[in-house]
Amino acid sequence: GSATMSSTVSVSDASGEELIGQHDPVPPTATTEILDLTSPRPKLSTQKFHPTPTKPLKSQRTPPHKRASASTTSVKSPTPKQQHRKQQQHSTSKLSLAAYQKILQKELGLEKFIRIFNRAISIASRPSIANRSDRTSADIAKLDRRITALESQRRSTLRDEATISEYQLRQKEKEAKLAASKLLRPLTSEEQYLVQKALYAIGPPDDILASLDADSVQRASMQTLQPGRWINDEIINYFLKNCLAKRDELLCSTQPGRKRSHFFNSYFVQTMFDDKNSHPAKRGRYNYNNVKRWSKKVPGKDIFNLRYIVCPINLDNMHWTSAVIYMEDKKICYYDSLGGTEWTKLEGLLEYVKDEHKAKKGKELEGWEDWELLGCPDNIPRQFNGEQFVKYSN
């Protein structure tokens, strides 16, 4: 007979245990929404309450042993820390900016507060995206012209650099040809006749056309000096030993204090690297034992009293190169009219110098780490096909 009634709105889990219960007065004909968690998906059900109490559903009944505790169940009260934070938020909502900054400084620490504050100012001072879009078409066109001009300037610079490089290369070629021409004097008419006869006269291939002491050059070898022919080792060795070595000896006799130089023949490097070894694993590998007696033929029988050591090198029976050991300057340089460098040969020659010092002096070569291995320089005479040949001399 009362105008209102007291009803219980409860939320239960799948086991039927009541989680939250509240006792609130509900007016008649009021609609109460009950969240049913027993179904696979949460759903809302609407029930109308009338003055006459309705019996709760079986799934909503509270077990007898939990009825006492269920009637007193309430929302979990906040912790002291949460209460303090809520009070602080309520109090700071009415604070000035300066007071709020002091609170943040106290909570964060001075260093962290300054870092965050400065970053906030930096972000606030950046131009907005809206401002960036305010650029006029004239500004965009001006920027495009600037980019085009810079790109044109860059391409022009690249063309100029390529032109300069090509010009410098031609100049170096001219200088190299001029330097090579100065190595030889013009031949007299009588000398020219002898050269033509040696190169083109008909005769037995084994005729001796030049000789000095135990060395000689046969007609067949001499005719390899004809244009388009490949020079053989007999010409190379004779030129080194009986032309350059004799000239070096003459210079040392007229220049007191000048050290002698030595010119190995073409078999020295070939033997050092075992190029003729029939065993593939040993062929082409450095072997000091193969050449440890060769230093007995150098002037003074000591390579460490020499100025230069010239080593002719034949590559695959097709091309002649050379390496020079500069004993006083502690460097080994490679010379190739094609501009290449055989670094393996340079490394092997340095090993030879080290092994020779250990064998002849009885100790390791001091300061061998300071020795330089130099590739083929740019300012030497060059050949531009497989038919030219250039001689080197110092």
Image (spheres, rainbow, N blue to C red):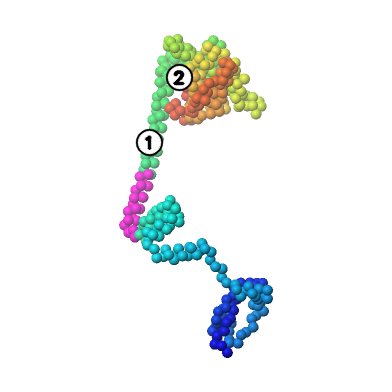
Q: Which residue is mark 1?
A: 164
Residue 100 visible to an observer of this rendering: yes
Q: Residues within 10 Å of mark 1 (few under 14, many from 20)?
A: few
Assign the C terminus to one quadrant of the image: top left
Q: Residue at x 40, y 35 (%)?
A: 165
Q: Residue at x 53, y 21 (%)?
A: 366
Give amino acid for label 2: Asn
Assign the N terminus to one quadrant of the image: bottom right
Looking at the picture, does residue 384 appear above or below residue 72? above
| Mark sitting on residue 139 | none
Tell whether position 134 is magenta.
Answer: yes
In the rendered structure, the answer to whether residue 136 lies left or right of residue 74 reads left
Quarter-of-image position of residue 173: top left
In the rendered structure, the answer to whether residue 58 lies left or right of residue 222 reads right
Query: Label 1's element?
Result: helix
| Mark sitting on residue 394 | 2
Say which of 125 and 164 sits in front. 125
The magenta stretch is 133-154
Tell whether position 368 is magenta.
Answer: no
Q: Which mark sits nearer the N-terminus, 1 or 2?
A: 1
Say which of 298 and 263 sits in front. 298
Q: Position of residue 316 (x, y in %)?
A: 57, 27
